[in-house]
């Protein structure tokens, strides 16, 4: 994943990253990536790893990623805890996002450096966040933009931490946008020009296609998607249960959920 991020930065090649809470979703994401011939990241949210079945989920996703016909990795997303970062690396995650964005800048720097030291022996990629991407990472709440990433501070942060990827706050939020999304394009371009590593855009759900294309043109290369996959998953589940309330055909249900995830993913693979 480290090499892929470096290549993404060098060649401005987009890398989609999709949150998978279930194996149906992961199967659909991988099918879409294989159809597009695109490398892909399966994200595991920190809450998902903390859940009782979390370690089993991550382990299963690693196996699925390893057997995919395209390069694929599992990344632990938005984790503020070094022990869980270690756990994910032990279970085979190819990348982790060390999220120190709730700390002050000095503490975020120290935390991120520790995460890089932890990940280095595994050869795993580390992504960090500077500024604050608001919104909930697992449930749909409408959020307004948080503190924006400062370009000069980002350059210094990346140099001093050695991260492979930086998530930027330029008006993007997780979940639903409370107001029309208005991204700070100049800021994104400044950051992407200054940084020697990949820039990632979180909160991709809800951004119109032309804004995604613009973000990519200006230098964002990693795109994280969760909310739209979740909505599609729950919507399809609801439809299927409404259509046949008495059915116990889990296999048919699973197939619908896989197909829904594949369709949603396909729309994001090429910004
Ligand atoms: P959305 O839920 O808004 O797509 O954001 C996903 C994300 O950034 C995961 O890190």
Image (cartoon, rainbow, N blue to C red):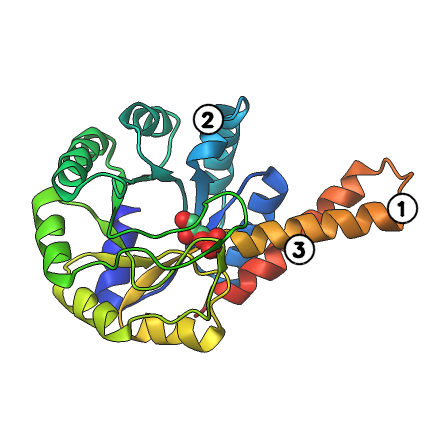
State left or right for residue 174 relative to residue 12: right
Label 1 element class: loop
Between label 3 and label 1, give the one nearer the viewer: 1
Image quadrant occupied by the C terminus: bottom left
Give how far across and how far down residue 23 sits, in percent.
Answer: 59, 38
Residue in the foreground of this view, choosing between 195 and 79: 79
- Is 114 left, or right, of 212 in this rendering? left
Residue, disc 1: 244
**In this rendering, would 146 be left or right of 177?**
left
Give the spatial CA distance, label 2 vs label 3: 26 Å
At 52% from the left edge and 30% from the top edge, which residue is drawn?
57
What residue did someone put label 3 on? 260
Q: Bin the neighbour count of mark 1 within 10 Å (Cα to Cα): few under 14, some 14-19, many 20 and up.
A: few
The reply to whether residue 256 is in sight is no
Is mark 2 in CB contact (under 8 Å) with mark 3? Answer: no
Circle 2 residue: 50
Say whether residue 220 is left or right of residue 236. left
Residue 212, disc: none
Disc with the residue nearer the chain's start (2 vs 1): 2
User: Mark 3 or mark 2, which is nearer the start of the sequence?
Assistant: 2
Give the residue displayed 76% in from the left and 48% down from the top: 238
Q: Name the residue nearer the viewer: 18 or 27.
A: 18
Q: Indicate the position of residue 59 as horizontal and vertical percent values.
A: 47, 29
Horizontal and vertical percent position of residue 129: 26, 48
């Amino acid at each position: 994943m480290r090499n892929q991020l470096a290549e993404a930065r060098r060649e401005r090649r987009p890398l989609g990253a999709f949150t998978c809470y279930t194996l149906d979703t992961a199967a659909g994401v991988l099918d879409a990536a294989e159809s597009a011939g695109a490398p892909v990241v399966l994200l595991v949210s920190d809450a998902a790893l903390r859940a009782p079945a979390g370690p089993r989920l991550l382990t299963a996703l690693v196996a699925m990623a390893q057997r995919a016909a395209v390069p694929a990795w599992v990344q632990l997303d938005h984790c503020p805890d070094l022990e869980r970062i270690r756990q994910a690396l032990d279970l085979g995650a190819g990348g982790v996002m060390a999220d120190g964005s709730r700390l002050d800048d000095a503490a975020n720097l120290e935390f991120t450096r520790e995460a890089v030291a932890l990940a280095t022996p595994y050869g795993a990629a580390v992504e960090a966040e500077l500024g604050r991407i608001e919104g909930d990472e697992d449930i749909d709440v409408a959020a307004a933009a948080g503190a924006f990433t400062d370009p000069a501070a980002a350059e210094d942060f990346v140099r001093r931490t050695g991260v492979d990827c930086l998530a930027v706050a330029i008006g993007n939020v997780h979940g639903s946008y409370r107001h029309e999304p208005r991204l700070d394009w100049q800021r994104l371009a400044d950051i992407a020009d200054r940084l020697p590593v990949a820039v990632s855009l979180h909160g991709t759900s809800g951004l119109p296609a032309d804004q995604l294309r613009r973000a990519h043109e200006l230098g964002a290369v990693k795109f994280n998607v969760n909310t739209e996959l979740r909505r599609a998953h729950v919507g399809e589940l609801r439809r299927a249960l409404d259509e046949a309330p008495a059915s116990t055909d889990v296999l048919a249900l699973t197939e619908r959920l896989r197909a829904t995830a594949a369709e949603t993913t396909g729309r994001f693979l090429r910004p």
